[in-house]
Amino acid sequence: MVDFSSIPSVDSILQDPVVVNLIEVYSRNLTVSAIRRMQSDLRNTLIDGKPLPNHNEIIDSISATIQNWIKPTLIPVINATGVLLHTNLGRSPLSLPTLDAILQTSKGYSTLEFDLSSGKRGSRLIHAEQQFKQLTGAEAAVVVNNNAGAVLLSLAALASRRKVIISRTQLVEIGGGFRIPDVMRQSGAKLLEIGTTNRTHLKDYENAMDEKPVMVLIAHHSNFRLQGFSTEPSLEEICSFAHAHNLPVLHDLGSGAMIDTEKFGLAHETTIFDSLNAGCDLICFSGDKLLGGPQAGIIIGKKAFLDKIRRHPFARALRADKMCLTALSATLAHYQKDEVEKHIPIYKMLSRKSDEIKMQALTWIEELGMGVLMPGKSTTGGGSLPEESLDSWLVALSFSKPDKFLSLLRKQNPPIIARIQNNQVVFDPRTVIDYQEYAFLNGVKAAINTMKA
């Protein structure tokens, strides 16, 4: 029979000066919960036949438990990987004016659903709409919480329990197991698959008309490219066919580019304007990819369809919050004022010249006191422009255990995320935001010193 009498009581622990301070800093309830967790651990220690820790170790354990409980899991990191829209690291960083706008709107009350002119309740669905209309020429726009939600809402509002044509070349799965067919089924729409995995022709669309579809869906290939023995009709051809049969076209564009990426030495990414000019009736895209804003799903297009989408119950379930809408509006203002490359981080990174990056990399090597310069590639990421890259320059550090060094980098404050290439740890200056450079260099130096110790 295990004797638990040696485990200190809650009351006795509460008398310790360190614990008294913990109560003042955090709260009595949180501290007592940590003490009880400690008691449970100590019971298991005795059951396992191990000696109890001393008093100071017990107090330290309680303090560590509280710190672990209140520590946020979503924290800033420094992205030195060279992947600009790194999905795991939050995709597009926001501009400083956008961050300021979020602070101003969120620290108090706002006109989220209030009409100042009438003094009555308004609608959050109007925010950013006027900007999208002015920038794109679309008749209307609706913002929801992400692009998957935008596609789900559009299909649910316009094609529930009815058939939607989609080419098998576009039945994609992207990160996290997200699959276009799954979203379509959840919307209530019925898939009408046409063509084959690698080839779809206009005649496949024509043959599908016997099934009485109500819409055509075109899905962005996102993170892969259809190559080799493959073919698909153009956007213009699909739209022309659909409209000849009185079918609307929904284009799941994905990346939401409003600037031609060829300008930065990349392949052409289908833009919002390409889709509109081709005749698409509705276009869905992300806010945090090539648009350079917050996570959001945007639907633009014909007003008649957007009016139905606004009225669907999913519009409330998927609605964006005030911080998202503020950030999106502030980001769009950069487009309106023709200052995208000046303020939006993703475009500041894309527009950086190779020589400028080389000079920065050489400065890093001098500052760190080690490392070699090597040519490298930056990639867009985020399901945009697959297999496309930009010339860059990397700082490479050699260690016998590169994985250990990566682990040390992740323990810095803020954590530094890098990658291994040819058994070396490499840093790409293109994705290290300018105001993070000082913290980056200090963090790398600290990790180097630990490796050398």
Image (cartoon, grey):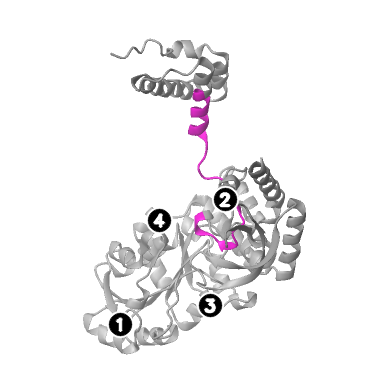
Query: Mark 4 or mark 1, which is nearer the start of the sequence?
Result: 1
Question: The disc labelled 4 sits on which kind of residue?
Answer: Leu
Q: Which mark is residue 401?
A: 2
Q: Residues within 10 Å of mark 1 (few under 14, many from 20)?
A: some
Q: Are marks 2 and 4 in contact (CB under 8 Å)?
A: no
Asked if residue 104 lies left or right of residue 174, the reply is right
Task: Report, in whole angstroms, how far the alpha carbon at label 1 lies from the one at label 3.
Answer: 27 Å
Task: Report, in whole angstroms, how far the alpha carbon at label 1 lies from the one at label 4.
Answer: 32 Å
Find the magenta span and give its range. Answer: 61-88
Q: Which residue is mark 3?
A: 273
Say which of marks 2 and 4 sits in front: 2
Task: Report, in whole angstroms, how far the alpha carbon at label 3 lies from the one at label 2.
Answer: 49 Å
Query: Which secondary structure, mark 3?
Result: helix
Question: The disc labelled 2 sits on which kind of residue?
Answer: Lys
Question: The disc labelled 3 sits on which kind of residue?
Answer: Phe
Residue 94 lies in what quarter of the image? bottom right
Query: Mark 2 or mark 3, which is nearer the start of the sequence?
Result: 3
Query: Mark 4 or mark 2, which is nearer the start of the sequence?
Result: 4
Question: The disc labelled 1 sits on which kind of residue?
Answer: Gly
Q: Whole-percent x and y of residue 298?
A: 47, 64
Q: Which residue is mark 4?
A: 318
Q: Quadrant of the C terminus?
A: top right
Q: Quadrant of the N terminus?
A: top left
Q: Which residue is mark 1?
A: 195
